[in-house]
Image (spheres, rainbow, N blue to C red):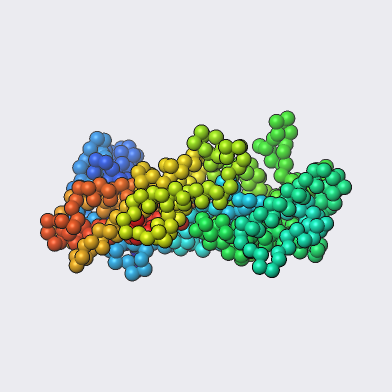
């Protein structure tokens, strides 16, 4: 089915045509249409156009009104102030548009696919090999997954990338320790192969290796040599390194599974994936003059990047000892994503503290010609997770909070809320709903805040039935499902001929804005805009539910139409919340 033209787009198109008729020399004039509290819409573009044409704005507004077509979309237009237009659409247009969305046989609610989709590579969910995931890993995973879902829904071809597989000094330390203690990661027959056991083994080995590294200078030297062997592709070193990666992935995947996220092996590409490209990347940068040698290292300099002493701070692509830094890997990854994967857009969901590094890497790639007007790279920099005290989230002892502990507590709190409200749910169903509500609460708290801002992690607020929480959205959806079940023989049927109550109009107009909201969230990589839309949708539904009798409506047609409004709202909530990676239980 073709996409449905929203009421905003329909009104905008009619106004643009009327403006063209009133001011033929204005070209394609923008009416500057927006939603309004005074009417359904307000057009603010006439004042600027009148000034340009040296015309009286109120007279021009009147001419535009006269030129509007007489049809079933616009009911009334009022000229106010210096040429503003307050526009009210017909009840028929609202219901008819929603009916067209409901009739979408693809289940997309009339949301169009992008006219010119491209290929986006998105780098997100980047835990550290051989280390436990902590609260700092939460945002990259949650924001990245939501952006992936939203972009794919709009028709974009998305390639996921998870930077798992670093190798640096710590890996030389770990591998050397494992070579000297070869049975540290062995598994006996019948030993558990779950994520938590894998992490316990890695943690034990890491502590032992760190103690040896700090206490033994000769071991420290051997460990550093082992990093060079790793980058050079020494078979024994690579085999030991792969053992760490495989053990870590067992653990990572178990945590991502708790987060209700899918991570696939083919999408996991760390530093090792670009190792064979590093030398060529350096050669290309040096031959083109983008990088120069400085004190034995290969560097890129920037006029606007200086240290506290006023001296230039370069991006070091290759160190003076011949080793490669993160910059060489990141630049090689850009080459791979642009030339092999044919990406138009590169997104990096990475902590804001890495902003300078990425700014330098992107500028280097632009100078080299790998990024240009046709291929863009952007960091989706995210802020810090804070505790209730407004400081970086830590345990009472001051340690970093383990991500698994945090997720388990969220599920426990949510299960208590579900149990308190549950009427006909079994213990198994309470546990299932508790997981969906708890994980949804954690994700939504993150996604309802602009990614660039810090946010406070407050589980009590997150699992609240009141306020801007995923639980509020989930209960709104479950309430609608309950009404639809209790409707008996009555079915949701749209009746465009009916007049709508104020609460029905407000709800219907907001549902109709779903497609535009999804498009905006996709274009700006802004899941928080979709979250805000969904919270307002649930709030408008609550008002509708309180003010408009559904099952006890005055007539059969009104009952069917209100059931239809319930149904299209539920479908919109379900689809929108799914794009944020959150589930909507049918019963709560």
Quarter residue 586 falls in:
bottom left
Residue 317, above or below 241: above
Nearest the viewer among 13 and 420 is: 420
Q: Is residue 339 visible?
A: no
Which residue occupies 61% across, 37% down? 398
Task: Indicate left or right for 207 with 538 as reference.
Answer: right
Where residue 274 appears, as percent x and y from the top left, is 70, 59
Q: Is residue 308 something one can see in this rendering? A: yes
Residue sitting farthest toward the right: 218
- Please name the residue shown 66% across and 68% down the image: 190
Residue 402 in the image: state x and y as whole percent: 58, 47
Assign the C terminus to one quadrant of the image: bottom left
Q: Position of residue 5 (x, y in %)?
A: 31, 59
Image-based side of 161 in relation to 81, left or right: right
Residue shown at the point (56%, 51%) measured from the top left: 404
Quarter of the image with the N terminus in it: bottom left
**Picture coordinates of residue 213, whole percent (x, y):** 80, 46
């Amino acid at each position: 089915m073709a996409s449905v033209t929203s009421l905003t787009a329909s009104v905008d198109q009619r106004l643009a045509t009327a403006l063209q008729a009133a001011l033929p020399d204005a070209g394609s004039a923008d009416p500057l249409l927006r939603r309004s509290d005074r009417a359904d819409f307000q057009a603010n573009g006439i004042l600027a156009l009148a000034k340009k044409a040296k015309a009286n704005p109120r007279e021009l507004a009147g001419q535009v009104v006269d030129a509007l077509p007489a049809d079933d979309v616009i009911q009334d237009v009022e000229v106010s102030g210096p040429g503003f237009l307050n526009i009210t659409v017909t009840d028929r247009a609202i219901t008819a548009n929603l009916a067209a969305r409901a009739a979408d046989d693809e289940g997309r609610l009339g949301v169009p696919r992008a006219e010119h989709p491209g290929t986006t590579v998105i780098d997100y969910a980047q835990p550290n090999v051989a280390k436990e995931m902590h609260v700092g890993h939460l945002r990259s995973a949650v924001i990245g997954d939501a952006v992936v879902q939203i972009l794919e829904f709009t028709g974009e071809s998305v390639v996921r990338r998870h930077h798992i597989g670093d190798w640096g000094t710590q890996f030389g330390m770990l591998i050397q320790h494992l070579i000297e203690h070869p049975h540290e990661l062995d598994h006996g027959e019948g030993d558990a192969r779950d994520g938590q056991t894998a992490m316990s083994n890695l943690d034990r080995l890491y502590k032992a290796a760190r103690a040896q590294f700090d206490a033994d200078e000769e071991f420290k030297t051997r460990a550093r040599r082992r990093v060079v062997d790793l980058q050079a592709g020494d078979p024994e070193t690579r085999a030991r390194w792969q053992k760490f990666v495989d053990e870590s992935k067992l653990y990572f995947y178990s945590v991502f599974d708790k987060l209700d996220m899918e991570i696939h092996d083919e999408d996991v590409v760390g530093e090792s994936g670009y190792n064979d490209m590093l030398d060529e990347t350096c050669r290309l940068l040096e031959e083109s003059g983008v990088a120069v040698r400085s004190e034995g290292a290969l560097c890129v300099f920037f006029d606007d990047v200086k240290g506290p002493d006023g001296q230039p701070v370069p991006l070091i692509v290759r160190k003076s000892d011949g080793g490669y830094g993160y910059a060489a890997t990141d630049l090689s990854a850009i080459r791979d994503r642009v030339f092999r994967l044919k990406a138009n857009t590169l997104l990096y969901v990475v902590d804001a503290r890495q902003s300078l590094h990425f700014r330098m890497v992107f500028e280097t790639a632009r100078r080299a010609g790998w990024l240009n007007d046709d291929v863009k790279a952007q960091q989706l920099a995210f802020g810090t997770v804070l505790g209730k005290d407004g400081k970086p989230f830590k345990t009472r002892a001051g340690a970093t909070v383990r991500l698994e502990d945090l997720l388990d507590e969220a599920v426990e709190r949510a299960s208590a809320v579900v149990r308190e409200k549950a009427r006909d749910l079994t213990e198994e169903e309470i546990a299932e709903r508790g997981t969906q509500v708890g994980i949804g609460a954690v994700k939504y708290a993150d996604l309802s805040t602009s990614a660039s801002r810090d946010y406070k992690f407050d589980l009590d607020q997150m699992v609240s039935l009141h306020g801007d929480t995923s639980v509020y959205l989930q209960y709104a959806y479950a309430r609608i499902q309950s009404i639809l079940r209790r409707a008996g023989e009555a079915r949701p049927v749209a009746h465009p001929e009916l007049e709508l109550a104020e609460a029905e109009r407000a709800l219907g107009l907001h549902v109709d804005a779903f497609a535009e909201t999804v498009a905006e969230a996709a274009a700006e990589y802004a899941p928080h805009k979709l979250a805000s839309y969904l919270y307002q949708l649930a709030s408008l539904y609550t008002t509708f539910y309180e003010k408009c009798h559904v099952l006890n409506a005055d007539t059969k047609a009104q009952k069917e139409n209100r059931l239809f409004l319930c149904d299209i709202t539920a479908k919109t909530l379900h689809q929108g919340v799914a794009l944020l990676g959150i589930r909507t239980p049918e019963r709560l």
